[in-house]
Image (cartoon, helix red, strand yellow):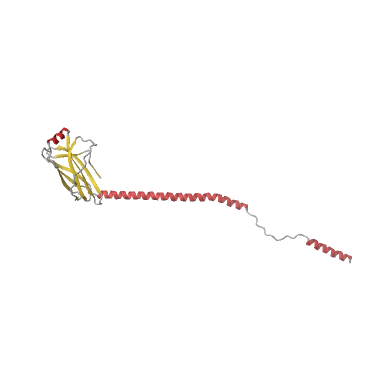
Amino acid sequence: MLVGSALLLSDVKADLTKGSQPTAFPTSQAPPRNTSNQTREQIDARVTEPVVVARDNLFFDFTIGFNALLALFSGLLWRVSRRQSQIAKASQRAYVYVKIEKVEGIDIGERPHFSFVVRNFGNSPAYRMRHQTTWSFAPFPMAETYQLPDLTMHASPEISVPPGAESGGQLIAEMPLTQEQIDRALAANAKLLIWGKVRYQDTFKDSHYTNFCFFHAGRDGAGRDQFLMAPVGNDAD
């Protein structure tokens, strides 16, 4: 009886001792972080960010450069096209020049009478062509700084001259020459001078001019009048 009681008491203590042991409560724990991956991501970010910025800057610079080249090319193309148009017009327009043919009446009591021609040596007609022409005695030799008097006379009637054709013109002095004019001209070693301006339009309706100035250089053995171009008053556009 005593033995059974002891055994029973021993079992009870064993159960109490077993029940008094601590019991762990269930908890959730985060998996350990991989520090090597995190470091690699940070390194990649530091490396790739400047590369992206440099790439964007390069693209921006390329865009600006391309647009600048495009604008330059467009400007050059416009200038070439404009130049070609100017060359085409220049090759097709009218050009005129003046040639003095004859002078008469250079004597006391006579009215000087000049004959000249205006020739179109261009490739299209000269439209609305008219001229102003006058004459005087001028010192000789003539300096390049010599100033021709203004043309104040009325222009001739407008005409059209086809390419390769010419139009004749005449200039007759209003008053006859006097002895005083002849003496003054001889004393100054002066030459007879004829000058003027021709205005006209080409086939493109652009206006042009030809200035001319010649002095009388005497007559040749056959009695033909000789005219030479003066150092001033000769230009055209």
Vertical position of residue 144 compared to residue 203: above or below:
above
Can you say which quadrant of the picture contains the C terminus?
A: top left
Vertical position of residue 35 compared to residue 222: above or below:
below
The quadrant holding residue 30 is bottom right
Q: Which residue lies at the image location 22% right of the left edge and 45% below the top edge?
A: 210
Decide which of 4, 82 is in the foreground and name it. Answer: 82
| Count of numbered badges drawn on the protein | 0
Decide which of 53, 129 is in the foreground and name it. Answer: 129
Query: Which residue is most to the right?
Result: 2
- Residue 60 falls left or right of residue 13: left
The quadrant holding residue 152 is top left
- Residue 103 falls left or right of residue 5: left
Query: Which residue is most to the left?
Result: 109
Can you say which quadrant of the picture contains the N terminus?
A: bottom right
The spot of residue 100 in percent (x, y) is 17, 42
Query: Which residue is most to the bottom?
Result: 1
The spot of residue 109 in percent (x, y) is 10, 39
Q: Which residue lies at the image location 29% right of the left edge and 50% below the top edge?
A: 85
The spot of residue 165 in percent (x, y) is 18, 49
Vertical position of residue 157 compared to residue 18: above or below:
above
Vertical position of residue 216 compared to residue 60: above or below:
above
